[in-house]
Image (cartoon, rainbow, N blue to C red):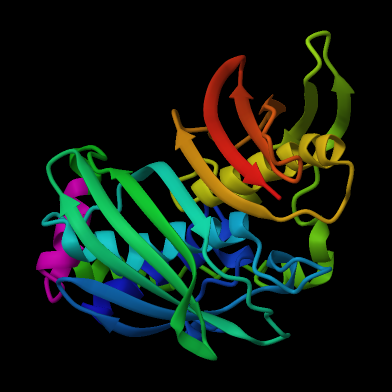
Amino acid sequence: MKELCKRWWKFSARSPFGQFGSILGLRLAEDGGSVEIINADRASATVYAKVPRWCVNQNTGNLKLDAAVALFDEISTYSGMCNWDKKGRPGVSVSLSAKRLGLQRLEPDDGIIVKTTYKKAGKTLGFLNVDIFHEKEPGKVMVRGQHVKFLPMGIGTSILTSHLRNYPGSPFVKGFMSVLATYPMHDVIRLGESLGHDVLNLEDVRTEPTETGSIVSTGNFELTKLYGNPIGNLHGGCSAMLSSLIAKHAAQKYLEKKDIELEQINVNLLSGIPTKKGAVTLSAKILEDFDDKDVALTEAVIKYRDSTAVDCLMVWR
């Protein structure tokens, strides 16, 4: 099963359609990254990966919760779903959720251990549970998440994925891997280091009070293949991070402080967003007042061509 995981990460590192996984540093050690597949069996999979500094809160050193979602979106797919679906399909994410269970500082070069547990997979949907641990405290859960995948991907893709999983020694698979090896790996794996926390830059951000007394933030984001998954749509984890970015503006205004942490996130991915060209519009609003004035509940929406593609609920403190 480890070999199947490796095939998918090699594909991700070379796909001409999307590069966000490489920006997250999710590449095998043999391909210049830090990903190590510790275990992969029929019930669970455990993966080690270093955390890029742009995925860490500058002030506290904690792993950003939206970044945790982005990391386990890809890790749980390639180390888990592709193994456990009988046709080897990675599927597309339809829901990503996570809750912070503990705060543990990540120093430079610190890594995380991501354990994905198989819950259920059928013809249409697959369900995964995810726990994330600090490498230095492998018994203490930092983040707990859930991942729901829509598995049908078309006949052509199913034939390819089925062969990758079930007939690894076939001439078809050997030929596919030989062709894949001719594609250069993305040269963006160090992009996060060079850009720092500006990897995702929103444009035209505005935060204003509404007539009903709420707070709304709006902005735009230009699409390129840098932010895509290997099939050319906006990476599910990137959608989570963009939702968090725009919602943070509204939450900071409401809580009247800059240094806030995302405590819980639930992302619904309603439709694919191609990253070839164009832009998305983002908006976020405060949903309701809590008795606890140190807590803010936000809803963020990402629209593509005037249609809602992503809806995200978040709790901030």
Up the image or down, 27 lies above or below 77; here it is below
Q: Position of residue 76 (x, y in %)?
A: 36, 63
The answer to whether residue 223 is seen in the rendering is: no
Quadrant holding the N terminus: bottom left
Q: Residue 177 in magenta?
A: no
Question: Residue at horizontal 42%, vertical 66%?
Answer: 75
Up the image or down, 65 lies above or below 167; here it is above
Question: Residue at horizontal 67%, vertical 80%?
Answer: 106
Name the side, left or right, on which 7 lies relative to 189: left
Up the image or down, 293 lies above or below 210; here it is below
Q: Quadrant of residue 94?
A: top left
Query: Could you say which is closer to the camera, residue 289 or residue 67?
Result: 289
Q: Residue 160 in magenta?
A: yes
Name the side, left or right, on which 108 lies relative to 275: right
Return the residue found at the far bottom: 136
Q: Quadrant of residue 62?
A: bottom right
Magenta residues, start to end:
158-171
Q: Position of residue 103 (x, y in %)?
A: 63, 71
Name the side, left or right, on which 268 lies relative to 198: left
The answer to whether residue 144 is seen in the rendering is: yes
Name the side, left or right, on which 169 lies relative to 260: left
Q: Position of residue 4 (x, y in %)?
A: 25, 73
Question: Residue at horizontal 62%, vertical 75%?
Answer: 51
Query: Could you say which is closer to the camera, residue 92 or residue 125?
Result: 125
Query: Could you say which is closer to the camera, residue 256 or residue 62?
Result: 256
